[in-house]
Image (cartoon, rainbow, N blue to C red):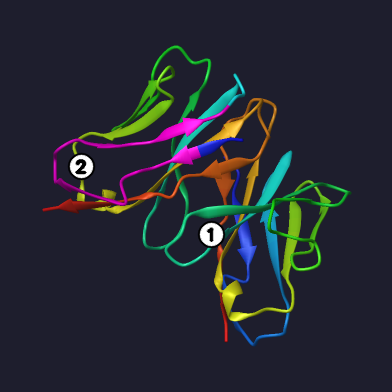
Amino acid sequence: AQKITQTQPGMFVQEKEAVTLDCTYDTSDPSYGLFWYKQPSSGEMIFLIYQGSYDQQNATEGRYSLNFQKARKSANLVISASQLGDSAMYFCAMREGGGGFKTIFGAGTRLFVKA
Amino acid sequence: SAVISQKPSRDICQRGTSLTIQCQVDSQVTMMFWYRQQPGQSLTLIATANQGSEATYESGFVIDKFPISRPNLTFSTLTVSNMSPEDSSIYLCSANRGGGQETQYFGPGTRLLVL
């Protein structure tokens, strides 16, 4: 069965510094996708970044990058140059199989950015 | 991208009553899902809404409690039946296009409080 683990309930980072949010996963399916979402206090789920299991390069989207280490089954999110608006809950998620299948979520990490 | 709307955005209900949540997507999507997010928790998948057939429920969720309809490719409803205070949660509709389209979109959620 698929599983997503986020071991950091909360993280603090100084404004303008980089921060890494950890995520490990477990699946027996060779084809899967990994996602990161941001959930601010408003409650909306904001898609940040996606990494496919067959992608050779780490995904990047602006200040977000995904450090994909397939052998270790980890998919850490790196946020560079943190901003106060980055303070939010961050969820790692995984979807098995080809496009269209269900996605499961980790427990989340709450990020606090300090001025 | 797909824009997803949900109605109502929030509601306060009495125990023993039922509430139907509507989800509308602005374009045709292959897969639609319903998630529950209990206070301070991560997202838990309730079911996959299948067009023209019965929804596929995850472990711990049953059709009698959470009946789901999906009459076409852009619309779905979730009913929370015979509510109790434990059903107080945010209910989120989600969709993706399938077929290799990786991004999974979320509606703004319905905040439900059961008294």
Which residue type does callout 2 highlight?
Ser
Q: What residue is drawn where x is 64% and y is 25%?
A: B100
Q: CA distance from mark 2 to mark 1?
A: 25 Å
* Quarter of the figure that contains the N terminus of chain A: top right
Numbered mark located on residue B29 in the image: none
Q: Are marks 2 and 1 in contact (CB under 8 Å)?
A: no
Q: Quadrant of residue B19?
A: bottom right
> Would residue A91 appear left or right of B29 to someone viewing this image?
left
Instruction: Check residue A21 for magenta coloring.
Output: yes
Q: What residue is drawn where x is 37% and y is 56%?
A: A40
Instruction: Check residue A14 for magenta coloring.
Output: yes
Q: Chain of mark 1?
A: B
Q: Quadrant of residue A104?
A: top right
**Residue A71's x, y, as percent?**
43, 17
Q: What residue is drawn where x is 56% and y is 28%?
A: A27
**Residue B44's x, y, as percent?**
57, 54
Number of on-image labels: 2
**Residue A17's x, y, as percent?**
14, 38
Q: Nearer the viewer, residue B97 or B40?
A: B40
Q: Secondary structure at mark 1?
A: loop
Q: Secondary structure at mark 2?
A: loop
Estimate how packed mark 1 is, as few (under 14), some (14 to 19) or many (20 or more) residues with alpha carbons within 10 Å: many
Q: Which residue is mark 2?
A: A82
Q: Which residue is mark 1?
A: B108
State whether residue B103 is above or below residue B11: above
Q: Chain of mark 2?
A: A
**Residue B60's x, y, as percent?**
68, 58
Which residue type does callout 1 highlight?
Pro
Which residues fall within the magenta stretch?
A4-27
> Would residue B92 appear left or right of B60 to someone viewing this image?
left
